[in-house]
Image (cartoon, rainbow, N blue to C red):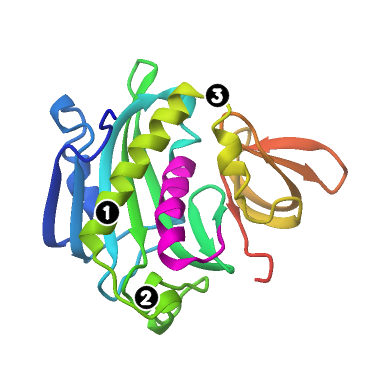
Amino acid sequence: MKKIIGKKILFFDTVTSTMDLAKKLVGDVNDIGTIIVAKNQTNGRGSNNRKWISNGGDALFSFILKFSIKHIHLLALTTSYSIMQIIRPETKSPLQIKWPNDVLVDEKKISGVLVNNFFNNSDEIWAVVGVGINVNSNPENIPDLIYPATSMKNLTNRKFNVKNLIEKFSERFNKDYLNLISDDNFYQKIESHLYSMGKESIIRNIYNSSDKKTKTTKQRILGLNKDGTLLVENMNGITESISSGEIAFINN
């Protein structure tokens, strides 16, 4: 199978952020697919300018891709799908994907994905994909978490080899990414695991390009469009597509 990522894996003890290091490699075709791994981050980042906090023993890594612009809304979802597929057999837990970039277990966050895109004048985009998986940590001990979280260790009462887990992710992502670019219906596999499917949900930080402001609304989640945008129905029964935003936890 063709290797999209994982041809080169760089390991570090402590960095500001694996995404910071990966950004320095953007633009060099020899570094496409490189994975950068760190044991600790002093300035890890999550979505919506939040900090990604780990108290040790987690999978913290970023990788570099060059991909088609038509998959811009599917990259984070595909990454989350691959994460879900490697966690499930290890934990035997019910997992869901919270659009656009989180993996949940019973409404607790176990993984998050952050994608930084770098545009040029072509149909291809460079991206740095940052991944955090709660593996051997105890996230419930982290103060001031916005959302509840859990880890693989908490779910199973055993420790995991982080390096092996990242290698498994690399293998799985290579398979899923190749399916993404060859199968226009791959999004349906992601959709089948979508959190709050068919339910009324609060969606925050929806960007309105006309006034360049964000809004929060209540919508019923209908599923995904082929391009990875979220298909919703508002309280007036009108359907629309959302390309950016954040689904709030149903019970939050």
Residue 240 visible in the displayed image = yes
| Helix, strand or loop at mark 2 | helix
The location of residue 41, given as percent across then percent down, is 22, 64
Label 1: few (<14), some (14–19) or many (≥20) C-alpha neighbours in 10 Å: many
* Rendered view: 127 above or below 164: above
C-beta proximity under 8 Å, tags 2 and 1: no
Is 74 located above or below residue 146 in the figure?
Answer: above
Q: Position of residue 153 (x, y in %)?
A: 37, 75
From this viewpoint, is residue 212 visible?
no
Please name the residue shown 57% across and 40% down the image. 189
Looking at the rendered structure, which numbered label has been put on residue 166?
A: 1
Q: Is residue 238 above or below residue 102?
A: above
Of callouts 2 and 1, which one flags the residue occurring earlier in the amino acid sequence?
2
Q: CA distance from mark 2 to mark 3?
A: 36 Å
Residue drawn 29% across the image and 67% down it: 58
Q: Is residue 111 magenta?
A: no
- Residues marked 2 and 3 touching at CB (< 8 Å): no
Magenta span: 76-95
Mark 2: which amino acid? Lys
Disc 3 marks a residue whose amino acid type is Asp
Q: Is residue 89 magenta?
A: yes
Q: Nearer the viewer, residue 151 or 248?
A: 151
* 42 sits left or right of 104 in the view: left
Dot 1: what SS?
helix
Q: Which residue is mark 3?
A: 184
Which residue is farthest right?
A: 236
Residue at screen point 87% across, 42% down: 237
Alpha-carbon span between mark 1 and mark 3: 27 Å
- Residue marked by disc 2: 153
Number of dots carrying numbers: 3
